[in-house]
Amino acid sequence: QQQQQHQQQLLSTASSDRPISLFAHRSNSSPIPSHEQGSQQQQPWQRQRQQLYQQEVENDKPAQALMVTIQDADYPAYNGQTVTIGSEHVKDGTEPANTWWAVSSSSSTSSHGMPPDDLIELTHLHEPAVVHCLRTRYAAGLVYTHTGAILLACNPFRTYDGLYSEATMKRYWEAGSGGGAGGGGDNLTDDGSRGSLSPHVYGVADGAFRAMMRAFEDGHAGNNNAVIASDTNAPFADQSILVSGESGAGKTVTTKIVMRYLATLSQRYASGACSRSSRHARYTPASTAAAYDREGGIEQQVLQSNPILESFGNARTVRNDNSSRFGKFIEMQFQRSGILTSSNIDTYLLEKVRLITQSRGERNFHIFYEILAAADGGGVAAAASQSDKVALGLRHATAEDFAMTSASGTYDRRDGVHDVDTYQDLKDAMLTVGFSEEEQMGILSVPAALLFCSNLTFVDRREHDGSSELDCNNPSLPNALDLLGVTGDALNDAICTSTIVVAGEKLRKVLSRDQATKALEAFMMATYGVLFRYIVDRVNGSITAGTLNGASSADDTAFISVLDIFGFESFETNSFEQLCINYCNEALQQQFNRFVFKLEQQEYEREGIEWSFIEFPDNQEVLDLIEKKHTGIICILDEQCRLTKCTDQTFVNKTYETCEDHPRFIGSDREKAHGCFSVHHYAGPVEYDSESFLAKNKDELPKETTDLLLSSSKPLLRELGEMLSTLSLMSSPSSADN
C-alpha cells in the first residue's frame, strides 16, 4: 500500500509539469521517467523526483533492470506491452535514449545543457521529445526554435528585455549583410553552417530581404515569375512570409515585428549609409534613420497602419485580448536599391457579426471602447480627447450604457493595455498616415452612431397588425440621427420597412418587431463593414512613395508579402465564420505540407540523394468535402442560396444527403435534427451550427441601408453609401467571400 501511494505521488509530480508517454517500474522501486538526465540546471519537479529516488536508494537498493510499460492509446499494437531495459542502458535510474542534449551537436545551446536550436537535430523526433524541447527552451526564455526553414514561436505573454531591441536588430542585420542570412531566416555563415545567432523572427525577415536582394543582383526582378519559372535554379525576387497559429499565439505582434524590421532595413538604404549590394551593407545608427522619418518616410506610414487596423478590426476574445478579427495580406514593395516604395493591404473575413453578439468574456471591436475612454487620461491629449467625446455625443457615456458594448459584461483588457492609450495611438497613427482632423472625426462618428443605434427600440404601430416602428421616446434616437445625418422618418423607413418587387411592381412591406431588429442589425453590420473597407482603401492610398523615392518600373521592384490570418478555431458554438476560417487553414495546411515535404523530397530526387519516402498527412479529403464542385459543402450552400424557399434546415438536409458517406463528414440523427454537422479537420473534429448559414453566405447588402446612407448630410456617409451601391452591383448570391 505504501508503494502504491509513493507511485501515485511520483506520477502526479510528473504529470503536472510535462507529458509522459512511458511508465517505468522496478521490482523494488517506483516509476522513474526515462528522459530527464542531462539538464545542468534542474527544474523543481526534477529535483523533487530526484530526492524521492534518493530516498529509495537509501531505503532499498533498486533492481538493475528497468521495466517499461508502453501506455499509448494511439498505437494499440504496442499499448500495454512491457519491455525490459538492461542495466547497461540505465544510469542513476534514468534511461538516456531521449536525452538529446547529452549528445554532441553543432547547436549553439546544446553545449550549455540546453536542447538544440533546431528540432531536426533531435536524436528522436517524436511528439514528447518535441514538446519537452520547446518547454525547456521556453522556461529558459528562448521563445524561438527552428524546425528546418520554419520558425516556431511560443508566446511568452510578457516583455523580454532586449529581445526586440535595436542592439538585437543590429546583430541580425550585420549577420545578414555580412554574407548571407539564408532564405527563411537561417542566418547561415559563409560556409553554410548555422551561425551563433539564436533563432529569431528577425532572422526570418532578414532572410526574405537578403533573398530578394540576391535575386536583384543576379538579374531577376519581381513580377516576372514566368521567366524565372523556366529556370528551376533561378532565385525569386518576390518573397512571402506566412504567419500562422492558433488564437493568442502572437500572430499580430509577429507581423508587426516583421514589418518593423523590413522598414528599418529600408531606412538604412534610404539614408545612403548602405551600398547597393546587400552583401556589403552595414548597420546605420537610428539617429540617421530618424532624420529620414522626419522627412515623411513611407516606412513610418506603413508601420502606423497597424494601430488603425487594430482599433477597427481587433477585439478581446476568450483567449486573446488583441485578436485580429480579420485576415490581412500585406505587400511591401521594394526597389532594386532596397528602398521601400509602397505597401498594399488586402483584408479578408471581417467578423461583422461581433457587432451584434459577443460571448461571455469577450468584447466588441476596440474602437468602441477607445472612443468611450478617450478623455480618461490627463494633460493636453486628454483635453483634446474630451473635445472629441463631446463632438461625438459621448461626454458622460461609458461602455455600460450601450447594448453593443455591455452585452457580454466585459469592458476591459487583461494584457495591461488601456483603451485611453490606444485611442491616442490611433489618433497619432491617423495623422501620420495622412488623415486630416476633419476626416478623423468623420470616421469616428460612424462607430459612435452605431453605439447609439444599438440602443434603439421598436414599438407596435397603432394598427395593431404586428407591424412596428421606431420608438420616438428612446433617448439614444436623437444622437443616432444627428451622427448619421438623417431624419427620423428616413431611418424608420430604412429599418422598419422593406421593398419587394413582384411582377415588375414595387410593394412596400411593414416589418414586425423581430424583423425590424434584424434589419437594424443588418444596417449596423453593413455600415461598419463598408467603413472598414473605406479605411483600408484610404490607408492603401496614403502609404505610397509619392515623390520621395520616385516611380519604379515593374522590372525594378519586388514584393515581400506577409500573410497574417486566423488560426484554426473550435468554440462551443461554431458558425459560418468558423467554417470559412477553418477552410482557409486547411488550404494553408496543404501548402505547408507541400512546402515542407513534397518540395523537399523533389529536391532530393533532382540531386540524386538516396532517401526513403516520408509519409505525411494529406488533407485533400477535407478540402474536397468543403470545396469540391457540386458535392462540397460550400457548393451545396451556394445552390441553396440560389433556390427559393430554402432554409438553413434544408441546407443541412441536403448536406447530409450528399456528404454523409464522406470519411471526413460526421453527423448523427440528433445533430441533423438540431441543424448541426461536423467536419473532421486536420486539427480535429469541429461541429458547426447551421443557423444563419444562408443569410451569412448571401451577405446581402440591404438596399434600404444604401439609400439611407446616400441620403445622409454627412459627406463620409454618402461616400460609404456609394461604395455599398457599387459592392451591391458586384456581389452575387453565390459569393462566400464574407
Image (tube, rainbow, N blue to C red):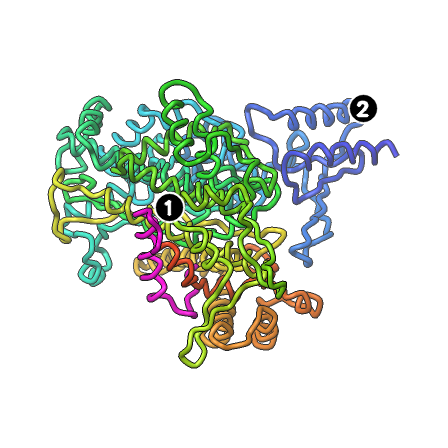
Q: Which residues are magenta?
A: 710-738
Q: Is residue 606 magenta?
A: no
Q: Nearer the viewer, residue 371 or 388?
A: 388
Q: Is residue 623 left or right of residue 203?
A: right
Q: Is residue 715 magenta?
A: yes
Q: Which mark is residue 59?
A: 2
At 55% from the left and 50% from the top, the residue drawn is: 471
Judging from the image, what secondary structure is the residue with disc 2 in? helix
> Given the image, on which type of amino acid does mark 2 rest?
Asn
Q: Earlier in the sequence, mark 1 or mark 2?
A: 2
Q: Is residue 160 left or right of residue 462?
A: left
Check the picture and name the quadrant holding the N terminus. Answer: top right
Q: Which mark is residue 149?
A: 1
- Residue 590 visible? The answer is yes
> Given the image, on which type of amino acid does mark 1 rest?
Ala
Q: Nearer the viewer, residue 279 or 4?
A: 279
Q: Nearer the viewer, residue 369 or 690?
A: 369
- Front: mark 1 or 2: 1
